[in-house]
Image (cartoon, rainbow, N blue to C red):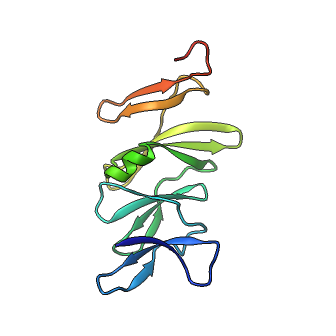
Amino acid sequence: MLVRARTRGQKDRVDWWTMSPAGEARNLTAALPAAPAELVRCTRANEMIGLADGALSTLDVATGNIRPLINTGNARVATLVWPDSEARLAASVSSMIVSVREEATESLLRIDLSSPRAEASAFPRASKSATLAGYHPDQNLAVFAAPQDPDGS
C-alpha cells in the first residue's frame, strides 16, 4: 500500500510511505529535498514518478531506490502537462509531456517511458501562448489552443 502522510514531529513536510502487509512503514521520499505532491504510475513494474523541487524522480516502491528520471541540465521541470491529473489517476503512463524552464525560457519535453531508461526529446509548440489541449501518443498527434491569440483557436 502507498500512503501520503506526515512524519511525526514534522508539521511542514508530507512524505510518501509504503506499508507492508505486516504494517511496517517505509518512507520512500525522505531522501528527496522535497516530497512530490503526487506520484504518477508508469508501465514499469513497481515504479512511480514524482515531481518535486524542479526535478523528476523515479521511485521504486519495492526497493525504496530513488533516481533521477531525466537530466534536464540547468532547466527545471515546472509542471506535468500531459496526461492531465485525472488521466494520471486512472491509468499507468508510457509517456508524458512536461514543461521545463531555464531562466526566462519555457519549453516542452516529451518523455518516453516505454524503455528501461526514460528518453526525453523536445516537443515543439506553435507559439509561446499556445497550450496543449490534447495529445495522442500512438500517433504523436498534438492539438494546441491559443485562445488569447487572434490567429489561434
What residue is drawn where x is 62% and y is 37%?
Answer: 106
Q: Residue farthest to the right?
A: 104
- The answer to whether residue 112 of the structure is visible from this angle is no
Above/below status of 121 relative to 40: above
Residue 22 in the image: state x and y as whole percent. 30, 87
- Total number of numbered discs in the rendering: 0
- The answer to whether residue 91 of the structure is visible from this angle is yes
Residue 80 in the image: state x and y as whole percent. 50, 46
Nearest the viewer among 125 and 83 is: 83
Nearest the viewer among 48 and 72 is: 48
What residue is drawn where x is 28% and y is 62%?
Answer: 45
Nearest the viewer among 114 and 150 is: 150
Above/below status of 35 relative to 44: below
What residue is drawn where x is 44% and y is 48%?
Answer: 85
Q: Residue farthest to the top?
A: 151
**In this rendering, position of residue 130 left or right of residue 42:** right
Above/below status of 48 relative to 5: above
Residue 44 in the image: state x and y as whole percent. 30, 58
Residue 3 in the image: state x and y as whole percent. 42, 71
What residue is drawn where x is 58% and y is 36%?
Answer: 107
**In this rendering, position of residue 143 left or right of residue 91:** right
Q: Quadrant of residue 19 in the image?
A: bottom left
Nearest the viewer among 93 and 1 is: 1
Which image quarter holds the N terminus? bottom left
